[in-house]
Amino acid sequence: YKTERINIAITKNEKEYKKLLIIKNLQQSDEKIYQCGALSDEGFTASAIQLKLRNEEEVDKE
């Protein structure tokens, strides 16, 4: 299957912002990251994100 990166909006909550920074750092690694967010009135919230990591080999096998 294809890998896609979902961009999310930064919320005003400082703790959520820190989580986004962590996610950003993870995106710079060699691993594929899947993000799933729940929609709220303000858009995607960082607290709703669930990360699922798979390494390149698993993706290449598909």
Image (spheres, rainbow, N blue to C red):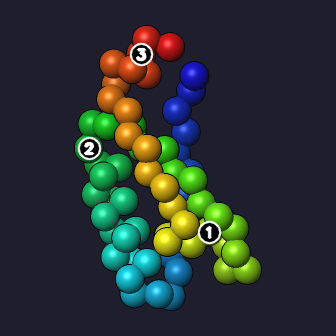
Res. 23 mark: none
Residue 47: percent from the left, percent from the top?
Answer: 49, 72
Reading the chain from its start, which is encountered first: label 2 or label 3? 2
User: Which residue sits at x=39%, y=20%?
Assistant: 58
Reading the chain from its start, which is encountered first: label 1 or label 3? 1
* Circle 3: residue type: Asp
Q: Disc 1 and disc 3: Cα gap in Å?
A: 29 Å
Residue for badge 1: 44
Disc 1, SS: strand
Residue for badge 2: 29
* Circle 1: residue type: Phe
Q: Disc 2 and disc 3: Cα gap in Å?
A: 17 Å
* Circle 2: residue type: Ser
Residue for badge 3: 60
Residue 24: percent from the left, percent from the top?
Answer: 35, 59
Asked whether disc 2 touches disc 3, contact meaning CB atoms under 8 Å apart, the reply is no
Q: Is residue 20 above or below residue 53?
A: below
Q: Is residue 5 above or below residue 56?
A: below
User: Which residue sits at x=27%, y=36%?
Assistant: 30
Disc 3, SS: helix
Disc 2, SS: loop
Q: Is residue 25 above or below residue 61?
A: below
User: Which residue sits at x=35%, y=49%?
Assistant: 27
Left or right of 40? Residue 50 is left
Residue 46: percent from the left, percent from the top?
Answer: 50, 70
Q: Residues within 10 Å of mark 3 (few under 14, many from 20)?
A: few
